[in-house]
Amino acid sequence: MPVDSTAPTLRARNAARLLTQVEAAAAARPFESVPTIDISALVGQTTGELEVAAKIRDACINVGFFYISGHGVDHALIAGAFDAGKRFFRLPGDDKRAVSILNSPHMRGYTGLLEENTDPDKDGDLHEAFDMGLELEADDPDAYAGVYGWGLNQWPQLTGFRELVVRYHEAMRHLAHSLYRGFAISLDLDADFFTSKHTKPISELRLLRYPSQPVPNDRHLGIGAHSDYDMFTILATDDVPALQLLNSAGVWVDAPPVPGTFIVNVGDLLERWTNDLYRSTIHRAINHPSRERYSIPFFSNIDPLEVVDVLPSCVSDDRPARYEPVGAGAYVQACMEDAYGVGGS
């Protein structure tokens, strides 16, 4: 029988979830809300970066989530991306399934209702999704290299959809660059520490539609309890409340929509890099009883061939390194295949 190479990665991920939750419960008061941070100093690279970075550090240690204002992303572009998602999800089922994620070796394209299951204790996620990654040219050899995170996107036959979604993806990459500066400074690293590590990154954009759910069903949530696999996520959401975060006391804390902001959260790889100093907090989304909901998460990551190893500054005699080095692409691929029930054996 072939060896399931994803098993050690997934076991380590599950063990880390338990350990960090126990530690957080013992070390600090459980968070009850999510802070908002104005990052305009990072976006403009002006005076005030140190103060912003200190707030990011506090939020990452104690919550793992924070809202950002002062991000500089054009509101019209955000609105256009939401409109593009709505247009796509209104397509006939056959047109959406023509670009099914299950037909893509790069796990990009359409996911139907209950085709993904982020929480193994549940029976599937009650949402539709469209995933795209870094847009590579057809003649780029990396598109055919078999490296997770590099490849060609699938696109539906929908006028203007591709162009608008790619523009939004580029805007998120630009915003992520500013946030990488903030994370680096917050960890007492050079501000450009991450710059050379995300030149051709795994950067996955997901358009999501959550249908209404008049009758609650604990087996089918909008998206089940999970942590994100990436370095960090930048989430845009409409005005329908859904997101909930699990604090160290085991209580689900609401993270309601805040106009004009994005929600940023630490992912598994940043948690590993910081030796569990920064928290990849477990979260979920609950479907509204009478309204459908749309959201657009951007999963920001480093280049797939980069290796994530615990930062020396996050290691001490009392806190030795908890993780072996792991390839960024290999880690995300293992988690994605687990969620879709593919890969391994």
Image: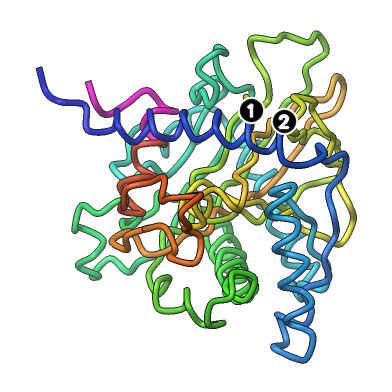
* Residue type pointed to by label 2: Ala
Which label is found at residue 123? none
Instruction: Compare residues 106 and 9 and report the one nearer the observer.
Output: 9
| 228, above or below 182, in the image | above
Q: Provide the residue designation for mark 1.
A: 223
* Residue type pointed to by label 1: Ile
Instruction: Compare residues 16 and 284 and report the one nearer the observer.
Output: 16
| 191, above or below 322, in the image | below
Quarter of the image where one finds residue 103: top left
Quadrant (top left/top right/bottom left/bottom right) for the C terminus:
top left
How much space separates mark 1 and mark 2, taking CA atoms? 5 Å
Q: At numbered mark 2, what does the secondary structure look like: helix, strand or loop?
A: strand
Instruction: Compare residues 169 and 226 and report the one nearer the observer.
Output: 226
Is residue 35 found left or right of 84 in the rendered image?
right
- Pointer 1 or 2: first along the chain: 1
Q: Tell me the residue at 69%/30% (across/down).
A: 284
Task: Find the magenta span and give its range.
Answer: 336-345
- Where does residue 208 sit, x and y in percent of width and height? 64, 40
Q: At numbered mark 1, what does the secondary structure look like: helix, strand or loop?
A: strand
- Inspect the magenta stretch and tell me whether residue 290 lies in it: no
**Marks 1 and 2 in Cβ contact (< 8 Å):** yes
- Where does residue 280 sit, x and y in percent of width and height? 60, 44
| 70, above or below 286, in the image | below
Q: Provide the residue designation for mark 2.
A: 285
Q: Tell me the residue at 75%/59% (across/down).
A: 58
- Where does residue 277 sit, x and y in percent of width and height? 59, 52
